[in-house]
Structure formats: structure tokens, C-alpha cells
Amino acid sequence: MMPPNGFSPRRCLPSPSGFPFFPRLRGFLVCAAAAVLLFSCANPSRDDPAVDDTGLPETPLWDTVGSADYVSPRGVSIDEASLSNQATGLEEDWYLDSSFYHVWVKSFSDSDGDGCGDLVGITAKLGYIQDTLGCDAIWLSPIFDCASKGTAPSYNMHGYDTVDYYRINPLFGDESDAADLLAAAHARGMKVIFDFVPNHTSTEHQWFRSSVADRDSDTGGMGSWYLWQNAALPWNPMGSSATWARNASRGQYYYAPFWSGMPDLNYRNLEVREEMKNVARYWLNRGFDGMRIDAVRYLREEPNQWADTAATHQWFAELRSEVVDAYGDLGHPKFMIGEAWINGNRPLLESYFGSAAAPEFEMLFDFDFASRVFYSVLNEEPGFYFEMYAGPKTMAGTGIAAFLSNHDNLSNRPATIYGDPWSLRLASALALLRPAVPFIYYGNEIGQKDAAGYTGEDIRLRYPFDWTSQALQEGDSDSLLAYHRALLSLREEHPALRRGEPTVLMAPSGQTLDVTAYAYALSSAEETLVAVANFGSAAISGTLSLDLSPLGVPAGCTALFGNPEGASVTGNVLTVLNLPGRAIRLYRVDLPTASPASDLCVQENDGSRMYLRGSMNGWAATTPMARVAGETDEIWTVSLALTGGTEYAFKFDSSGAASNWPLDQSWGSP
């Protein structure tokens, strides 16, 4: 989540190349900045030049306020009579077996031609999401009415500055459109979760306006629904000191660590706590299957601590027990997944699962994953990825979500980061062939790149879905879309890919694996699978031997993904033949050898390369092309955006070496 202008004080922007930051370095810098300012802020000095001596009552920072008897004007209860459009027949932890498609609503499918995607458009594309791609669940980016809608279709409307939690953004449709989407999805056996933003609202929300007007009272109205102080306190939760903004009408400062246009709600106010629980009930009652919850680390502050507080954990435990779990008791299990943006600190991340006595989130996003994959592929060194491969398994019914990019400045889109198409495919496979719940950001499955001209701005990640490219790939069995479909089919068919326990595999005694190779097994009650990956760009010729004895006695070797002729089992040793660069293969070893499914044994990297050189890239061989297999002629494809009004010259070249091509030796057209 980021403010409309693309700046977020809690998140470092990517480097100009768009590669992820080193997470531990970023965490160190933020922690060091916080340590400098670590002192009590509850009673700032009156000599502080930021103090405004208005004499107005301040919001108590650490005291509980508000009425315990508060009932929301939109109050709803959780009972069968209140429910509609509910999914049926779901297992209690159904989300662990799902594959999610992350839809940026504004940019996915525009049903009415107004330049803005909408809910009706998503309903029309459910067949693409489920049948063509293979995802059975959807995460919708914020759909509630927001302040920063702008007037132009290209405006970066992000939706995290909510102005009404009970109203659908009118550019997306209305509540009946949401109901139709849920009904159509559930009829297909699909699930839909919404983006819930409980930490802050927009300054244009009526709650904030009422809080401004109620400045003379901290016990009635909404005066204490937000944090108001006469001084701009030196709180620094995200590495920025600009966390308090002054409101001229009230004559005080309000706490807004993300952006001055998004003030934090006061979760020491019992009325706020109940109201936000009611928002969750309202939409879960209408059929949503769960919630992605934004910015979970920053809900409630404590003295000298502004993130990851015990008070924050307490509220999410309340939300889980009082709201989410109640639907499971009625036979409609829901779940919530938390955006706890934490790098390099797995215990802190896992703390948001809660405990057996006070459970919190059923699932958490893994913000280490994308950078681990990138550095493993970039350095041709699998250790970056596999040192955190297994993921936390601390509580029953909990899971970790894996993703390569999202709407935020975590990373560029994978097709922008991985110029080599085989590196892109390997990264995609690593996100799907592991026991973590995949979240595929819209467009990544067709290799959509960042929009040009927006380096460092999150709008580059939120441009309209390329339906032209999608249509071309849908008819191509060797396309990136087909590759994703094959991987997602494997996840659906094989329980070990969803819930298997991992085991690292080594070479037989006296032998060593190639330095770029890594192998692991996934074992469940139903099956045992073995994955073998080559992180290197060069092929591993000859044989690669793996010791399967930790898995018991293998019965055979059935190829599920990759070259079906590339492996055999003798005794406890799996021998893999000629593993191409950036390739990954998947085998089942607990059954006698059987014929593989031909549509899943996909083409592998054959070592050939083709590049598009041109004046658009300074005649460098930086634009890789993909070979179309199964054709009599040599057919290669590439897709890139060209700016209008400029003449380009280009030439195809298979050398890949750096050189400058004279214009008169090239061919093409303006």
C-alpha cells in the first residue's frame, strides 16, 4: 500500500534497475534510525518548537477511551439470517490448497469502456482466471470508495485512502455488482477475498471530519477516533520523522505515519475497534471468503514502540476469535492473510500467527521470497533461495504466501527483472513448486513488464492488463501462460506440492552435486515428489545423481514436469540426465514408472538464443526472444513497447555479444 503520489515513508523504493533491495540492510537502517529516537513521547517538552499551545484537550495516548456499549450505525450480526452468497462445502483450511490471482481492479478488465476496470469486467473474466490460467481464488485490490480517484483514466488511484468502508468505489460498480461477482465465482467453486485497510482512513472520510469538528471533547462524538496532540511528537515508526500533520481547523497535530492524507485510527478507542470489526462482518456476511489485511504491524502504538506491539496482536486475536472464526462455526470458514512487511526476521513474521491460545492470522505474505529467488537466479547460486525454502510451519492450519511481485514497490515485475525468458520461467516455477500458497499478480503470467517512464513509481506496476498478448499466448502451447497453467495443474493434482514436507537431497556418498544444482523432495501422506533445479545459465551435461534413501525405498521415477526421458532410478539413486540451464524438473518416485502426461512435460531450454538489436536499445543485445517450438521454420517471438513519433531500426542476432551495429547494416521499418 502506498499513497497516491507514489511516496511511502515506510518503504524504500527499488534501485533504478528495479531489483529488490537487500532486506537486511534496509532493516538495519530503519532500526538504527528508530533507535536514535527511542525515548518517551507521551509528554513532550513545552520548550519544543513544534508545540502548539492551543490548550485544547489531547487524545490520551495510552488510555482506553470510547464507550464499550457502542453499536455501529451499520451494525450487523453473524447468523444464518444475515448471510448471503456464501461458498459451501469448504474445508476448514481450504486456503492452503488454493492458488490466488491478485487482481488490481482498476487495470484488469473494463466492461463499459470508461477507461477503468470494474467488478463486472472481473466477473466476465472468471473463465480466464480459472480455466485458462488455473487459479481458483482471487484477491481484489481495495474496492471501497476512496479519496484519490482523480479525473483521468491513467490516474494512479490506489484505493488505500478509504472514505467509506460500506460503499463500493463507484468507478468499480456497486454492491449488486460485488454480489454478482461472488455468486458467479462460488458457482465455479472459486473464492474471493477483499483488501481490508483498518489502520487508517482518508482525511476526507466523514469520521475524520467529525473528529476535527469534535475538538472540544475527547469523550463524546468522534473526537478521539484519531490521535490528536498539541505537539508534533517525535514518533518514527517507518524511518521518517514526518509522521504528524497539522490540521488548521482543529489547531492540532494528527498522527499519519504513512502520508498526511491517511491519518491513523485510534485503536485504544473501543468504538473504533467495534466499528472496524463490523466492517469485516458486513462484507464477510455478503459472501467474501476472507480478507487480505493491510499494514498489520502498525495498528496500536505503545510507549517507545510504534510497530509490532502487544496491543496490535491483541486486536487481531480479537478479530480472529470474535469475527473470522464465527463463520467457521456456521459452516462457512473464512480466513485472513496479513501484510506484515518484514524482511530477514522469520520469528517476528511468525509472531503474527499468534498462539494456540490466541490465534491471529491463518496466513502471512513472505516478503523475503522475491529477493531470494532473484539473487539465486542472478548469482546462479541456489543457496539464496533454499536457505529459507521450507518456510514456517509453527501452527496447524497456517500457511505462507509466495509471490514474485505485487502492486507495491517490493520489486519490478518479473518479466522486467528477468530479461532471459528461461530465467523468468525458472523463477515462476520456484514460486509454484513448493508448499506455499501462490499469489500471482495479474499480468505476470503473460510476462507483462513494468510500464515505461515510471522508474521508482508504483504506477509502473498497475497498468492495464495486456489482453492482446494474452490472446496470442492462449493459443501457444509453449507460451509463458501455458507454462503457468501446467504448473498450476500440477499443484491441483498433487497434494505434496501444497502440503508436503520438504527434504533436501544430496548426492550419493563420494559424489557432489553441480554447484548450480539443487534438489528437494516433498512428501505427503499420498505421494513423494522430487524436484531438481539448475540455477545456472549453462547446462549440466552428463548425469546428476541424487540419494533418495532419506525418503525410503523408491518404486520408480515418473516425470511430471520437464524432459520425460531425462531420469531413471536404480536402487536408492535417482539419476538425472543433461539438465539444461535454468531448468526445473519434477518427478514422482513412490510409484512404478508410468507414462507421463504429455501436456505437462514442457519444452526445456535447448541452449539457443535470439536477440532483437535496435536503435531503441543502443544496438545492444538486451532484448531476448523466445523460440516457438514445433514449427518447421525458425520462428521467434518478442514483445516490447515502442514510443510513438520516433523511428526505429532493428536487426535479429543470435550472437548475444556486445557490439554496435551500423545503421546501414540493419533492416526494419520506422
Image: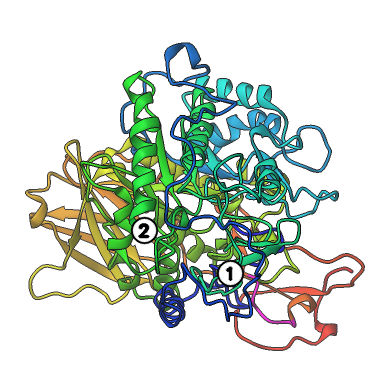
Residue 362 visible in the shown view: no
Determine which residue is flagged by label 1: 9
Q: Quadrant of residue 396?
A: top left
Q: Position of residue 387 (x, y in %)?
A: 27, 68
Is 321 in the magenta?
no
Classify residue 594 as left or right of residue 610: left
- What residue range appears in magenta? 618-623
Q: Which residue is outermost to the right?
A: 645
Please tell me the numbered disc located at residue 568: none
| Residue closer to the observer: 639 or 232 | 232
Q: Position of residue 69 (x, y in %)?
A: 46, 29
Q: Position of residue 138 (x, y in %)?
A: 52, 37
Pick the quarter of the image with the N terminus: bottom right
Q: Which residue is outermost to the front?
A: 55
Question: Helix, strand or loop at disc 1?
Answer: loop
| Residue closer to the observer: 435 or 568 | 435
Question: Helix, strand or loop at disc 2?
Answer: loop
Is 622 in the magenta?
yes
Please tell me the numbered disc located at residue 309: 2
Classify residue 204 as left or right of residue 404: right
Q: CA distance from mark 1 to mark 2?
A: 19 Å
